[in-house]
Image (cartoon, rainbow, N blue to C red):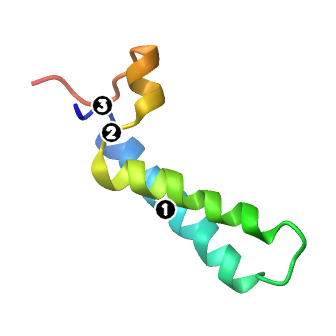
Amino acid sequence: MKKNVGTIDRGIRIVVGLALIAAYFLNSGGTYSWLYLLGIVPLVTGLIGSCPPYALLGINTCKTK
């Protein structure tokens, strides 16, 4: 996959993903607490640097070389 997620975008995705996963473990008894596990998506896309919806829409936040 081609990298299409820039540095700032990656950092935000990783922080948001980790925060959502941490919220799941801190509030695991809630009714909809499983929704916090959706934090895996921004975490993974931030770590690999590629976002499939960005590719479909032609968005690229990486700086060109």
Q: Looking at the image, which is closer to me, 57 or 61? A: 57
Work out whether 2 lies above or below 20.
above
Q: Amino acid at mark 2?
A: Ser
Q: Residue furthest left?
A: 65
Q: What x and y, as percent, mark residue 7? A: 30, 44
Disc 1 crowd rating (10 Å Cα; few below 14, some 14-19, many 20+) is some
Name the residue carrying label 2: 50
State how far apart marks 1 and 2 are (Cα).
16 Å
Q: Please identify the quadrant where the C terminus is shown.
A: top left
Q: What x and y, as percent, mark residue 5? A: 33, 37
State how far apart marks 1 and 3 are (Cα).
18 Å
Work out whether 31 lies above or below 47.
below
Q: Amino acid at mark 3?
A: Asn
Q: What x and y, as percent, mark residue 57? A: 46, 16
Mark in front: 1 vs 2: 2
Q: What x and y, as percent, mark residue 9? A: 41, 42
Task: Verify CB contact (< 8 Å) between mark 1 and mark 2.
Answer: no
Task: Verify CB contact (< 8 Å) between mark 2 and mark 3.
Answer: yes
Q: Is residue 31 left or right of residue 1?
A: right
Q: Residue at x 69, y 65 (%)?
A: 36
Which numbered disc, 2 or 3, marks the residue that appears first in the sequence?
3
State how far apart marks 2 and 3 are (Cα).
5 Å
Q: Residue at x 68, y 75 (%)?
A: 23
> Exactly how many numbered labels are in the figure?
3
Q: Please identify the quadrant where the N terminus is shown.
A: top left
Q: Amino acid at mark 1?
A: Val
Q: Which mark is residue 4?
A: 3
Name the residue carrying label 1: 15
Which numbered disc, 1 or 3, marks the residue that appears first in the sequence?
3
